[in-house]
Amino acid sequence: MNLLNISELTIKIGKKTVLHNVGLSVKRGEIVTIVGPNGSGKSTLLKAIIGALEPASGKVERSSDLRIGYVPQKLHIDPTFPLTVRRFLCLPYSFTKLAIQNSLEQAGVEDLELQQMADLSGGQFQRVLLARALLSKPNLLILDEPTQGLDQAGSANFYRQIEEVRNQLTCSVLMVSHELHVVMATSDKVICLNGHVCCEGKPEQVASAPEYLALFGSGTQGALALYRHEHTHSHDQSHDHFHENS
């Protein structure tokens, strides 16, 4: 069975229908990316999946062994509040030192355990949020535009880390992103959302679909092809070289 099956999902907020008749599935081990313009219902869909919003109609079927790790779009922490990364990861539940070290290592920031949260860069902060999500040993990692505020190279590095996590943990990944040229190349399946599912399929299929082009234009195809070339050779290239060519 798939980890997640959604069928004919309609979500209303007040009198407004935000999502209408949405269907999607997440198989075990695959990376699924949701793209769409602002206001298309992407974050609303994630909230329905994690159970924070009740559907007006339709079904969200979760496998009996589903364990979700959630990385939010943003999280505000009072910069004047003294809070180390280790202590942050133990809120609201306590974890062993080994579990914390393992999650930080999986997120690529194993050296930040004793750093103050207020002193982290944007990229470090997002990786700590990723580490927090990994503490629950998820088999479905959900990310809601996790690289907002990062530069292009930082975003690409973050998504490479997500691929490594998927490979290490053999978990599924469901993420929302506006960075089409980056995430589409790392995805097994792309879903284009605009209140409903406009189109879905492999990245190449979606990038050439009329519905997708109507929303985003044809320029993203070139960016997708460029990133695919970079992605193939990324492990042999320096960070600066990647940045210049992306």
Image (cartoon, grey):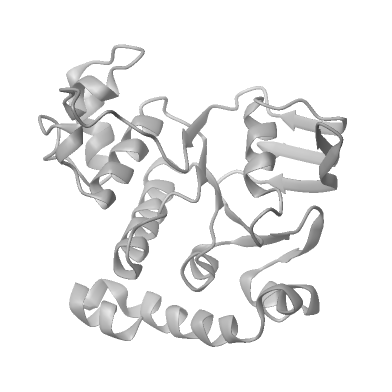
- Compared with 226, 86 (above or below) is above
- Compared with 108, 50 (above or below) is above
The part of the image, by quadrant, that contains residue 79 is top left
Q: Is residue 238 visible?
A: no
Q: Is residue 69 visible?
A: yes
Q: Position of residue 111 (x, y in %)?
A: 11, 40
Residue plotted at (27% across, 77% down): 243
Residue plotted at (39% across, 75% down): 231
The part of the image, by quadrant, that contains residue 196 is bottom right
Q: Position of residue 139 (x, y in %)?
A: 51, 34
Report the quarter where the C terminus lies.
bottom left
Residue nearest the viewer, comparing 21 with 60: 21
Residue plotted at (81% across, 36% down): 11
Q: Position of residue 209 (x, y in %)?
A: 76, 77
**Left or right of residue 56: residue 28:** left
The part of the image, by quadrant, that contains residue 103 is top left
**Left or right of residue 207: residue 80:** left
- Compared with 89, 200 (above or below) is below
Q: Position of residue 30 (x, y in %)?
A: 57, 52
Residue nearest the viewer, comparing 24 with 181: 181
Residue nearest the viewer, comparing 148 with 16: 16
Total marks drawn?
0
Report the quarter where the N terminus lies.
top right
